[in-house]
Amino acid sequence: MDLKEKLVSSFMAFEERVDVHSDLHDIRTNALKNFENKGFPTKKEEAWKYTSLNAILKNDFTVFPKQENAIEFNQVKKYFLHEIDTYKLVFIDGVFSSHLSSTTHDGIDVCLMSSALTKPKYKMVIDTYFNQIASKDDSLTSLNTAFAIEGAFINIPKKKVADKPIEIMYFSTGNEAALMVQPRNLIIVGENSHVQIIERHQSLNENPVLTNSVTEIFAQKRAIVDYYKIQNDNSEANLVDNTYVSQQQESHAYVHTFSFGGNLTRNNLNFYHFGERLTSTLNGISILNDKQHVDHYTLVNHAQPNCESFQDYKGIFSDRSTGVFNGKILVNQIAQKTNAFQKSNNILLSDKATINAKPQLEIFADDVKCSHGCTIGQLDETAMFYMQSRGIPQKEAKALLMYAFSNAVIESIKIPELKQRITKIIATKLGVNLGFDL
């Protein structure tokens, strides 16, 4: 039995063991039908032209863990942003860990999707937001919707500033020979509210893991959302991340994606504009080696006038690693006075490393400022020679140039402790001590 058959056949048993209302049952059933009809995406689809899941799907994944697996904080402390106080939502093999988490209902909700999906007090919120911006057509999003039960539920009411960042941590213990997990996150940020969120998926050993994650983010009028994704997993970890962002008037949504590890990572990032004078910012850094593969697929749908979007993706690829960037800006006819900018800059450190880039502009308005650009090259030999002539060893000179290449994205991180952490990870990936006071 292949993975698709296993998932479809287990759906009825899944629904029998979760307490859901009839509306959600219909949503799940329709989503499963879509996945059953389409199956897993293949390279025959234009959007997946350079990314194949075939080798991953050959694993015999357990789709429901057999038992809850406890881990202690000292085993995973290094993965948290422990330099500052944060709210924490921690999941182990897809199951909530209360003793590692720090939740709250004090003015804001930082709690569980399972609670939001099943408790009557959240019904109005779920009816209003759940599965409203997520694609009904994408097969992997549909698969997640069919089995959605656990993940992060964050609701920031009007005129509230979350008093500390929120960390969403998904750990895989490796107690299963191969495990598939499907977290679902719903994040609502009310008018004039502000939140900072850090998300990480982390395997604790080398057993294969396939994570199919969906996150829906709703930024209401004048809301500010800072979202950071840290992807620095083990060599057998595979992540398909589907993030959908709905923005209302004058809101600001920032999503930073740091792809440093894992076997295969696919980031589908979709922004939809539902109000004027708003800003969308999509930044990313990828530093890969060995046979790692990362695929960034972005969409910014400008559907209202007087809005801005900025995309800045940096990639450094060595050994046999592969990168993909497919960025699409869609400017509808009504979206006059749009400013939309996109760039993808990449460095290949090996003759066998590969980058496939496809920036796209679809513009149906005539009063806009839009641009896109893509560069692929190697390190500047003149700069290397200059630095070495000043006494900097070759390895350190190379690392400093690559750090400088990524610096614009690093500097846009708004949490100082997270900026330090990302800098340390980059130094480790580059194999040097960059000499910063961290």
Image (cartoon, rainbow, N blue to C red):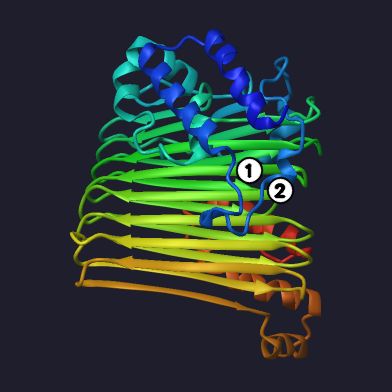
Tag 1 and tag 2, C-beta contact below 8 Å:
yes
Question: Residue 423 location in percent, x, y?
Answer: 64, 58
Precedes in sequence: disc 1 or disc 2: 1
Seen in the picture, residue 389 relative to 437 is either above or below; the reply is below
Q: Secondary structure at mark 1?
A: strand
Q: Foreground: 56 or 88? A: 56
Q: Residue at x 74, y 23 (%)?
A: 71
Q: Is residue 28 left or right of residue 378?
A: left
The answer to whether residue 327 is visible is: yes
On the image, numbered disc 1 is attached to which residue? Answer: 239
Which quadrant would residue 156 be assigned to in this image?
top left
Q: Residue at x 46, y 75 (%)?
A: 373
Quadrant occupied by the N terminus: top right
Q: Foreground: 430 or 294? A: 294
Question: Residue 126 location in percent, x, y?
Answer: 35, 23
On the image, numbered disc 2 is attached to which residue? Answer: 262
